[in-house]
Amino acid sequence: MMFSQLLRYPAFYAVIGLAGFGFGVWFRRSHWAGRPGLDPRIGGI
């Protein structure tokens, strides 16, 4: 039971990390290509 949980959590966090990274790249590209300079505070993230 504990071994399956140890295998489950790293994969769970890896999926979240990849999804977050992919969303960040997409958000930056869409923000830069769409409306650059819309809000300087947003671009700094």
Image (cartoon, grey):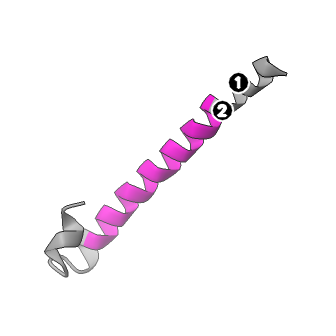
| 22 in the magenta segment | yes
Q: Is residue 1 left or right of residue 33?
A: right
**CB-based contact (under 8 Å), mark 2 and mark 1:** yes
Q: On the image, which quarter does residue 43 sit in?
A: bottom left
Screen quadrant of the N terminus: top right
Rendered location of residue 20, percent (x, y): 46, 52
Q: Which residues are magenta?
A: 10-31
Q: Position of residue 35 (x, y in %)?
A: 23, 80
Q: Work out which quarter of the rendered image holds the C terminus and state it.
A: bottom left
Q: Residue farthest to the front? A: 2
Residue found at x 55% / y 37%: 14
In this view, which residue lies farthest toward the top?
A: 3
Query: Badge 1, how many Cα within 10 Å: few under 14, some, many 20+?
Result: few
Which residue in the protein does label 1 denote? 7
Numbered disc total = 2
Q: Is residue 25 magenta?
A: yes
